[in-house]
Amino acid sequence: MLEASFDSDGVNLHYVEYGGHGPPLVLLAGLGGTAQLFRGLAPRLSHRFRVVALTRRGHGRSERPGDGYNIETLVEDIRRFLDALGIERAVFAGHSFAGLELPLFAIRYPDRVDAIIYLDGVNVLLEPQPDPANDPVWATLETHPKEEDLLSQESYLSYLKRSRPDLANIWCEAIEADRLEDLTMDGKRVVMDGHGRAITAKMFGGLGAQRDPAYGDVKAPMLAIVLGGLQNPFLPPDAPEVLGRSANAYYVESFRPWVRRRTELFREAAPSARVVELDTSNHTVFVAKKHETVNAVLDFLD
């Protein structure tokens, strides 16, 4: 595993070369994620591919410029990443928000895309979204760290595990390494600079018409790995039974139909694409169902 950076039109972007021999496989994390999040997945694919992962601008160790968060610039960052590594064509796998970048990249640069894999990254515009305020489990979660949670990396990671059961339930080396990438210290105190919220707003504000990807215009083969679970992903493992029943009922009645409808719209837009549903409701599907994800990816690319 080699970590390095390259210049994307004056912005220094971090990436991880996970190694391997064969055709290139480019991994892109979702909003707030970094190249470290693929530490578990990448080694299981490196026997077939040269696996590399990019951390987009504003995330982790990549630079945080004041602008350039519109989707056109993010797509150009991907193109410059390929150029910097001497990659002519690649298979792309993108998590979450990357599912908005990759269709546009494939439309702009069709000769550089062999296939696209969406890791819970099907982002068909479907409003209104389910309101998490109606989820009974949300009222039980911590929303802001206390002062004692900011005294060290360890104390902050403990806070994350309490406030993000969806991460705590699948905690592993990859999750921890990814979270540490965005963690900065001022002496002995964790700094909460709020950059993530500002960058998130700029990224979604810069989507424009690309908020609803033109999947039908993508010529490359596509695989969408989607969620098929029925359990509320934010339910703590030690939650009382009553809370568990109500939280799971909310997910099944309010959120699950929304997920399924987005998948149906993707199928309608790209009828030749393959869809694989995995038995999990965890958004970080490739960590929650690592082996099943690898099998789905290899079966698709075979």
Image (cartoon, helix red, strand yellow):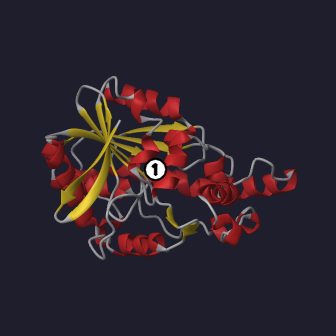
Find residue 140 and report its horizontal and vertical position in percent.
76, 65
Q: Which quarter of the image is occupied by the N terminus?
A: top left
Q: Residue at x 46, y 69 (%)?
A: 196
Find residue 186 and report its horizontal and vertical position in percent.
51, 69
Whether residue 233 is visible, yes or no, is no
Q: Residue at x 22, y 39 (%)?
A: 90
Left or right: residue 145 versus residue 65 is right
Q: Residues within 10 Å of mark 1 (few under 14, many from 20)?
A: some
Find residue 277 and report its horizontal and vertical position in percent.
51, 39
Q: Which quarter of the image is occupied by the C terminus?
A: top left
Whether residue 171 is visible, yes or no, is yes
Residue 218 lies, with reference to residue 164, above or below; the image says above
Q: Secondary structure at mark 1?
A: helix
Q: Nearer the viewer, residue 221 or 265?
A: 221
Amino acid carrying label 1: it is Glu
Left or right: residue 132 versus residue 218 is right
Residue under numbered circle 1: 264
Q: Residue at x 62, y 55 (%)?
A: 157
Q: Nearer the viewer, residue 5 or 81?
A: 5
Q: Nearer the viewer, residue 69 or 247?
A: 69
Q: Residue at x 39, y 71 (%)?
A: 204
Count of numbered badges drawn on the protein: 1
Find residue 263 and report its horizontal and vertical position in percent.
46, 50
Residue 138 lies, with reference to residue 102, above or below; the image says below
Left or right: residue 153 versus residue 244 is left
